Amino acid sequence: MRAPITITEAVCAAILCLYAVGTSRGDDLMGQGRDQEYEAAITRAEILYQAAQNVCENEQGSDRELCFKEAKATHIRAVADAKARLKAAQMVSDRRGNADVMRGEGKW
């Protein structure tokens, strides 16, 4: 007999699946600008948060409160990760631009 899956496991599995789908399209994302990549990450985080809230609605008592707290924490981490990735991409882009200018390859 198999053990039932918990809400936390279901939410984590959904997040991992969406992450896997997002990273499997890595070549498509490289063509997009960093702002579009950021917006896509925020949209994914919002969709996952709404799905987690819907799952949490079916819980009872303290499990329900814990489920909502975990969903909120996961959402906050996803948004912070998206912001960090955007900031890192901007920093790399700025450094590459500065390196081109130092080599005399900058756009005049």
Image: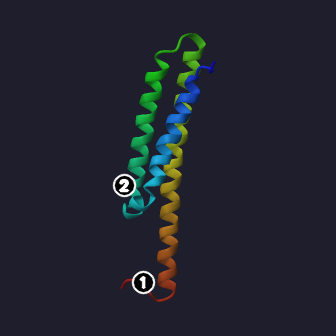
Q: Could you classify mark 1 by the number of other residues whose Cα lies within 10 Å: few (under 14), some (14-19), or many (20 or more)?
A: few
Quarter of the figure with the C terminus: bottom left
Task: Report the residue at 39% width, 42% height from top.
Answer: 43
Label 1 sits on residue: 106
| Quarter assignment of residue 25 | bottom left
Say whether marks 2 and 1 touch (CB < 8 Å): no
Residue 100 in percent (x, y) is at: 48, 82
Residue at the disc numbered 2: 36
Q: Quick check: 22 left or right of 88? A: left
Circle 2 sits in a helix, a strand or a loop, which is it? helix
View extreme (bottom): residue: 104
| x and y percentages locating residue 24 in the rendered image | 46, 53
Q: How far from the left and from the top, in percent, is residue 52? A: 47, 28
* Badge 2 amino acid: Gln
Residue 46, relative to residue 32: is it above or below?
above
Near mark 2 (Cα within 10 A), the count class, few <14, some 14-19 or many ≥20, is few
